[in-house]
Amino acid sequence: MRLARVVSPEGPTVLARLDDGQAVPIVTCSARFASDELRDALAADVDLGSIDPIGESFPVAGASWRAPLCFPQKILAIGLNYADHAREAQLEIPSNPMLFTKFTNAIIGPDEPIRYRRTDSEEVDYECELAVVIGHRARNLAVEHALDAVYGYTICNDISARDAQFSDGQFSRAKSFDTFCPLGPVVVTADEIGDPQALGIRTRVNGHTVQDSTTAEMIFSVAELIAYLSRFMTLEPGDVIATGTPAGVGMARTPPLYLGDGDVVEAEIDRLGVLRNPVAVI
């Protein structure tokens, strides 16, 4: 099943099942601050595959899309989790997953602009990442059972202000500027993805491929990440885990390639689609 938040022809944003180019609306999305229909449905154990439509289906083509999750309780992100990225950065393989967080203010959806002030950063970078959506509360999971906690997968572009990241010595500010967490375009349920370590992952900037790898390059697999994180914190329905980025990031290129005004960045993962965002320096 493929789920998305899209603006219906009647005006309201809806959570919809996608079927053969049509959006089947199943929940009307609230404008209330901090509401998140997908997160709440997962917490209530609602079967979104069988819930009755609340209106007529409409074509997905031409519709405006929103991030499929807008207020997860947690956005957990993993640094340096691809062997090819570690090689390009000339860094040692970490012995444990390197955890940091992004905040919900950073979330935007497909085609929404990544915005920042040049006075705040001159080194804004892209990072295409496979993002895991947790389906039920989980704690102290064994690796062999960890994937049972996954509801589905989506794409995260972990936008990063590298100058802020390295001057601060930690990641919170650099990773959490407003608009620095494009998410989407859809959540695809785990049964349609199968092995999360067998997905092509790539990024294009202005049509030029800058990242082209596979999730097989992950140092810590999705199952290992979930098991590790669940040792220390309870994972909640709708939590998002961004699992790291492969080689090709802007800071590692010669010369460095950072995002600027008017650029268009496309993050793509097999079977999950393309997450496209323009860049606007304000």
Image (cartoon, rainbow, N blue to C red):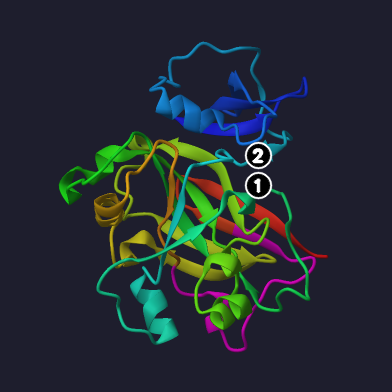
Based on the picture, tell me whether residue 31 belongs to the magenta stretch.
no
Three-letter amino acid code at the position of disc 2: Arg
- The quadrant the N terminus occupies is top left
Question: Residue drawn 51% across and 30% down?
Answer: 38
- The quadrant the C terminus occupies is bottom right
What mark, if any, has residue 110 been given in the picture? 1
Residues packed near mark 2 inside 10 Å, few (<14), some (14 to 19) or many (20 plus): many
Question: Residue drawn 60% across and 61% down?
Answer: 176
Q: Which residues fall within the magenta stretch?
A: 246-266
Q: Quadrant of residue 60?
A: top right
Q: Residue 132: horizontal and vertical position, in percent?
A: 41, 47
Q: Residue 9: horizontal and vertical position, in percent?
A: 76, 23
Q: Quadrant of residue 118?
A: bottom right
Three-letter amino acid code at the position of disc 1: Pro
46 relative position to 206: left or right: left
Residue occupied by mark 2: 66
Q: Is residue 278 above or below residue 124?
A: above
What mark, if any, has residue 266 been given in the picture? none
Q: Is residue 126 visible?
A: no
Tell me the element at label 1.
loop
Based on the picture, tell me whether residue 252 belongs to the magenta stretch.
yes
Q: Residue 241: horizontal and vertical position, in percent?
A: 42, 52
Q: CA distance from mark 1 to mark 2?
A: 6 Å
Tell me the element at label 2.
strand
Question: Residue drawn 60% across and 32% down?
Answer: 35
For the stretch drawn in magenta, the main secondary structure is: loop
Question: Which residue occupies the foreground of this view, 218 or 271?
Answer: 218
Nearer-N-terminus badge (1/2)? 2
